[in-house]
Image (spheres, helix red, strand yellow):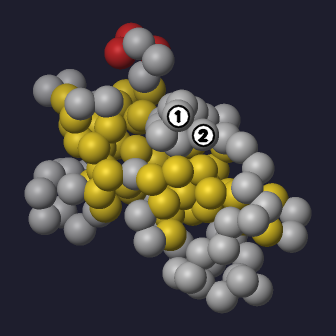
Amino acid sequence: MSQSQHKTHPHHEHVHGPGCGHIAIRHEGHVDYLHDGHLHHPTPNGYEEHVLGVDERTPKKCTPDHHCGAHDPAHHHGENCGHPAFPHGDHIDYLVDGHLHHPHGDHCDNHGLVEIV
């Protein structure tokens, strides 16, 4: 997505930066902050909303054999599940122990690693 296509929040009450309390990830050569299910990127004109793209590092594929020791297999991701919601491509994933989980039927797909900074 080109910079001109990003949704911008010119007035944002919270100032994102190191130690602000939000998860920070490396994304396309810069740092974004995960805030209420959105990736915010600080710019001089406000905050751009970014979405993690679907690529080799963060694929959108079914992985029915993914077994994550980070949570109980009976755990279901969704609103208020305790894991941060994360925009990925055209859907929402949940950040679990450094990687993206996507609820899919009776399992969670592994949609790849994110670099937390």
* Near-viewer residue (102 or 80): 102
* Near-viewer residue (6 or 51): 51
> In x, y percent, where is residue 96?
50, 69
> In x, y percent, where is residue 22?
29, 62
**Quarter-wise, where is residue 79 in the image?**
bottom right
> In x, y percent, where is residue 41?
28, 37
97 relative position to 29: left or right: right
The label shown at residue 59 is 2
**Quarter-wise, where is residue 85 in the image?**
bottom right
Q: Residues within 10 Å of mark 1 (few under 14, many from 20)?
A: few
Q: Secondary structure at mark 1?
A: loop
> At 12% across and 57% down in the image, what residue appears?
18
Which quarter of the image is occupied by the C terminus? bottom left
From the image, tell me which residue sits under label 1.
Answer: 56
55 relative position to 65: left or right: left
Q: Secondary structure at mark 2?
A: loop
**Which residue in the rendered view is the most extreme toward the right?**
105
> At 71% across and 43% down in the image, what residue appears?
61
Marks 2 and 1, how far apart at CA: 5 Å
Q: Are the residues flagged by discs 2 and 1 in contact, CB closer than 8 Å?
A: yes
